[in-house]
Image: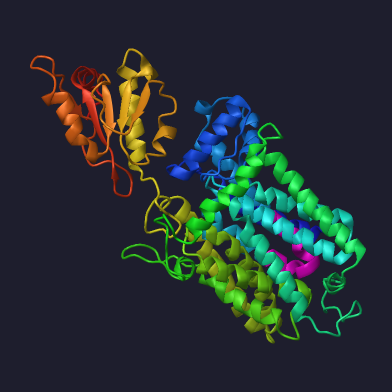
Amino acid sequence: MNLRTAAVFLCLIVIAALFRFPLLAVRPMHCDEAVNADKFGILLEQGRYEYSNQDFHGPTLYYLSLISAKIQGIRTYTDLSEVTLRAVPAFLGVLLVGAHILLIPYFGLRAAAAAGLLTAVSPAMVYYSRYYIHETLLILLSFCALLSLFQYCRQRRAVWAASTGVLIGLMYATKETVILPVGCMLLAGLATLLGASGSASENEPRPSGSVRSVHLLIIPIRRANPELLRHLALAAAAALVVSAVLLSSFLSHPSGILDSLLAYRTYFSRGAGINTFHVHPWNYYLGLLLYFHSPGNPVWTEALVAALALPGLWAAFSRKGVAGISPMALRFIGFYTVFMIVVYSLIPYKAPWNILGFLHGEILLAGAGVVWLADRCRTRGAGIVLAGVVGAGVAHLGWLAWQSSTRYGADPCNPWVYAHTGKDVFRIAARMEELAAVYPGGLALPVQIISRENLWPLPWYLRRFTGVSWWNGVSAMAPNAPVILATPDMEPALVSKLYEQPPPGQREMYMNLFGQYAELRPRIEIRGYVAKPLWDDWRQRGDGR
């Protein structure tokens, strides 16, 4: 690696870090983030992880989170913070940008750097790199598996077959949707082989350009020989061993292996749109990427990526290709991206973070598209115009990325905000801290939370409170706590318990904790009630409003 290459990618890594690490705590925790934090808390405190086939995904993110926690000397769940947790996917997002340097043997420096830059500033990539969920890790592992596969096709050595298997095993131990990118990789490989000329051979002309020996030797894979079969078996064994070790918690919970397979009963049903609210039309993802707008708010678009990906896709299937880019590698990426777009669009179940898989494929094509367009600029003026247009588009993407992650981090006008916790949760948590400050027992303040709704991430924000009890209905037997949080549907039964059932003289007055409407998530209202003595103490201290 020469100094120029190192300097280019160092700049890209710095850009990626500047978008991903600042202000990590400014956005409220999404309920999925809070659930993942709770799962990690068990691993942190008890040193164990047990795979569940109900929505909680694999353990790789949690094991990586141990590094972040240990570096900061954090040993308990209550000491965790948003910054500690979100720093993990943020680092993985930076690593994803840096990993594009490994694409140079196949795409050349210009295309690899362009793809790295677009990944660094893509609003969707930035937003979910600041999200404590599994998606960014899955994309990084998918990209590394793809690069390892490319390297195997060039050299056909056992080490690259094994590394590809290890990466696929890590993908499986990360998230169950692994079957989609891996399936698309297999289809892309098959389509690339079938699309190759019948007369192609190892002496096939290599692409022109400064990058030499970038010709991807996929053609020999068509020959079923003993060495190939051994390498396939090695890759499969590596994938099985790695995934089994992690999903079984290093063999201490072997049923996790079977549970990971049984989980697909749920995921196949949900993917078909059965028993889920997350069903969207086929063009849902394309709408999020190309044009998303509500009156009075910014226009959100990553159309630049799609516009640049189109010439990259054209070049993938043209005879001339792109100078310095392996035609077989580019064609594979073209097939892979198209298959990913089709598969994810056809599946009824859709959540916006799932877009990252095929978006990164588009970004790789866009990197090739930039080079293809640059090579067709016959005059210096045309090159300046192209650089200006692409530069302005990249700057706009960067502006949107920053706005989406900060000012609009929890605003529904942002396409990447989905069933997200509102900023009212900060007010709810602050009021609880204020009440605990005047309660003699401090954080042991008894709190009853009554609801049939999913109230995550409220448990995260109340994790330091030791007196919290959760109820799915108003209990006539439970003593009244000095603080009660409830959803509106519980209010009639709660009012009856507090003011109708007790005999006169035994009724305690409760005051409204929140002076205005408080919402946990869209259409999930939280109402608070405080016993009058505690309310008076709070008011006397000057915290009450």
Q: Is residue 153 left or right of residue 101?
A: right
Q: Residue at x 47, y 67 (%)?
A: 301
> Which residue of the protein is positioned furthest toward the top in this rendering?
440
- Percent across and percent down for residue 71 are 65, 31
Q: Quadrant of residue 296?
A: bottom left
Q: Is residue 371 above or below residue 415?
A: below
Is 464 magenta? The answer is no
The total of numbered circles placed on residues is: 0
Q: Is residue 277 left or right of residue 321?
A: left
- Percent across and percent down for residue 332 are 72, 72
Main SS of the magenta segment?
helix
Q: Residue at x 51, y 44 (%)?
A: 54
Color theme of the render: rainbow
Start-end of magenta stretch = 98-114
Q: Residue at x 51, y 69 (%)?
A: 346
Residue 140 visible to the viewer = yes
Q: Is residue 482 above or below residue 89?
A: above
Residue 1 visible to the viewer = no
- Percent across and percent down for residue 182 are 67, 60
On-image quarter of the N terminus: bottom right
Q: Nearer the viewer, residue 353 or 188?
A: 188
Q: Quadrant of residue 342?
A: bottom right
Q: Nearer the viewer, residue 379 or 301?
A: 301
Q: Residue at x 52, y 40 (%)?
A: 36
On-image quarter of the C terminus: top left
- Percent across and percent down for residue 204 are 88, 81
